[in-house]
Image (cartoon, rainbow, N blue to C red):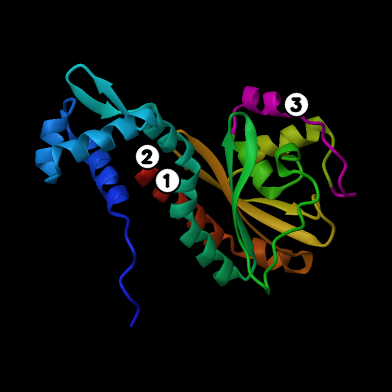
Amino acid sequence: MAGAPTLIGSVQRALHLLDAVGASERPATAKFLARALDLPLPTTYHLLRTLVHEGYLRKLDDGYVLGNRVDALGQRNTVQAVVSRARPALQSLRDELRGATYLSLYQDGEIKLIDVADGPSMPSVDLWVGVHEVGHATAFGKCILSCLDKPGRDDYLSRYKLADLTPHTVTDPRVLEQRLRLTRGVVADREEYLLGTACVAAPVRAPGLIGAVAISAPVRRYPALMADPGALSRAANRVARAVALRA
């Protein structure tokens, strides 16, 4: 039987202080916090001074409030929260369709690949060119671009050349725009990014977020992936619901 984990008491007390300050509707005084957590007042003052020094708390005239470091943590962890909630859907899709799965988001004008669920028998695509700059050639990139309005697409495409990655890559801006405008739902990349590989993507739409869920497989499996895109769409909807719950 495994032994009990070793816990650091001072760390626990500091975290409990942060919780108590965050739960208080008003600035919390040291005496209030000491009573609420059953801590000696000198210990409470030592911990509070440390947390203020590190930026996790701020000391006001009438008590303590959460500091800027806590706010920064919450902002940095937005993508981590999305990954945490989306991972089960990606793994389920990977196992159901037997291919590596991907989650990408549109953030600050860029297409970003933020998570991949693959396995020994389902390897992910060799990303030999940065996916942020070749949205025109990847299924999830085209899926995201199709969800943007015309000014949004124009802004992205003005910053990245339509690189000719394979003989199948669309490099004519007019052809690409026409296809993106007509896109509804599932989007495919059939050897446009990498010869021998096909990828299919479905949009993820949630408040304040545009993204795509995709699956890759050898190009010989392309007809099967396109024949029944329901599993992919369901996975994208699960991710959208998970993100909406987080929001």
At a point 53% along the width and 60% down the height, the residue shown is: 90
Q: Which residue is drawn at 64% across and 63% down?
A: 100
Determine contact: label 2, label 1, CB under 8 Å.
yes
| Residue pointed to by mark 1 | 243
For the residue marked with disc 2, what is the amino acid?
Answer: Ala
Residue 167: numbered disc: none
Where is residue 151, by image quadrant? top right
Give the quadrant of the C terminus.
top left
Q: Which residue lies furthest to the right in this view?
A: 167
Q: Residues within 10 Å of mark 3 (few under 14, many from 20)?
A: few
- Could you tell me residue 71's position as x and y percent? 39, 31
Is residue 207 visible in the rendered image? The answer is no
Q: Residue 93: where, in percent of width, then height? A: 54, 64
Which residue is denoted by mark 3 in the rendering? 159
Q: Provide the residue span drawn in magenta.
A: 148-168
Q: Name the residue under label 2.
A: 247
